[in-house]
Image: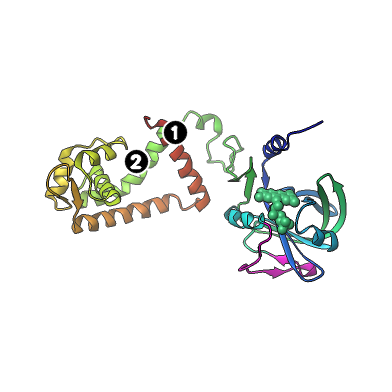
Amino acid sequence: MSTDPGDLRRAFGTFATGVTIVTARSPAGQDVGLTVNSFSSVSLDPPMVLWSLAKTSGSRSTFMETDSFAVHILAQEQAGLAASFAQRGVDKFAGLELGRGVGYVPLLGECSARFQCRTVFRFDGGDHDIVGGEIVAYEHFDRAPLVFLSGRYAVAVEHPEAEPATEDEEPFATSTLISLQYLVAKVHYECQLALRPELARAELTEVEFYLLAVVAMAGPCAEDCLLRRVATSGAAVSGANIDHLVHSGLLLRRGSAQEGVRMTPEGSRILMRLAAIRKAIESEALKDFSPMEIGVFKQMLRRVVQQTQPA
Ligand SMILES: Cc1cc2nc3c(=O)[nH]c(=O)nc-3n(C[C@H](O)[C@H](O)[C@H](O)COP(=O)(O)O)c2cc1C
């Protein structure tokens, strides 16, 4: 069968894999390593793994000569390291803190798991060699793994239909009845609840807090533009809110409505305090999530915002 290599690569790419870095040390004492997603576990007894090495790889001669290698299953924070070990002709180990394993192979840290292996077979595999190793030592750590899918790095998120991990988790059937809109509104309500007394103390409404935040982000701006920007959040905002902020000494009118308003030092002070409180509330609400999960969460919400925003 003749194949279009690009198309075949795309077909292979639909198989989500983890990402590893395989390292070794040449008999001449040079460290080598490359990013590999063809890794596979093979056998529990004896414990064995395999991976395939491109015949064009600059590290090939080392892996053909040496009998020791180490496989590092990368953690989700290590996409940068994966990209670095997928390069050629550079010193990939520069600046890295290395341990040493069996056969003095370089060991990388911060990964999800690490297998030190003794090479037990090498098979011809077309444009790759298939390298098999018996595990002589291994470790695993409590770090979420990096994923590779369709040519892109990704993170693993639990399937919504997965069996509930705890008894108090909702089963999927009922959770599908709860709309995203309800969940977003509930999160907003709960987070605002703790902010409300602080807003009351500052004699501000929620929408006036948003107005201050927009002026802080955008700099001095025309009043109609300011109102439009805050209104995109769905908040009911009017010129009366700007008047209130001006009368309270938090915003200053620069002249005409076109010239707009700017923040006063008191406005900045109040905004900083409220923003810090809001940040603390958010941090508390998200304390059980990893930075990566928070990133995914925000990325998804941003996509919904883009999708629902009028063109
Ligand atoms: C996610 C990812 C997975 C890869 N998987 C493999 C693999 O399984 N086998 C392989 O030989 N190269 C693989 N590569 C390519 C090598 O990492 C790349 O060609 C590297 O530059 C080889 O380094 P070297 O020439 O110094 O040996 C992969 C690259 C990436 C980004």
Mark 2: secondary structure: helix
Q: Nearer the viewer, residue 171 or 219?
A: 219
Q: Quadrant of the N terminus?
A: top right
Query: Which quadrant would residue 116 be assigned to in this image?
Result: bottom right
Q: Which stretch appears magenta?
A: 88-107
Horizontally, residue 97 falls left or right of residue 188, namely right
Mark 1 CB in 8 Å range of ligand 1?
no
Please, what is the three-letter code of the amino acid marked with disc 1?
A: Leu
Mark 1: secondary structure: helix
Horizontally, residue 46 falls left or right of residue 263, namely right
Q: Is residue 167 above or below residue 82?
A: above
Residue at which label 1 appears? 180
Please tell me which residue is depicted at 74% across the width and 47% down the height of the picture. 38
Query: Which quadrant would residue 110 be assigned to in this image?
Result: bottom right
Residue at which label 2 appears? 189
Q: Are marks 2 and 1 in contact (CB under 8 Å)?
A: no
Query: Which quadrant would residue 237 be assigned to in this image?
Result: top left
Magenta span main SS: loop
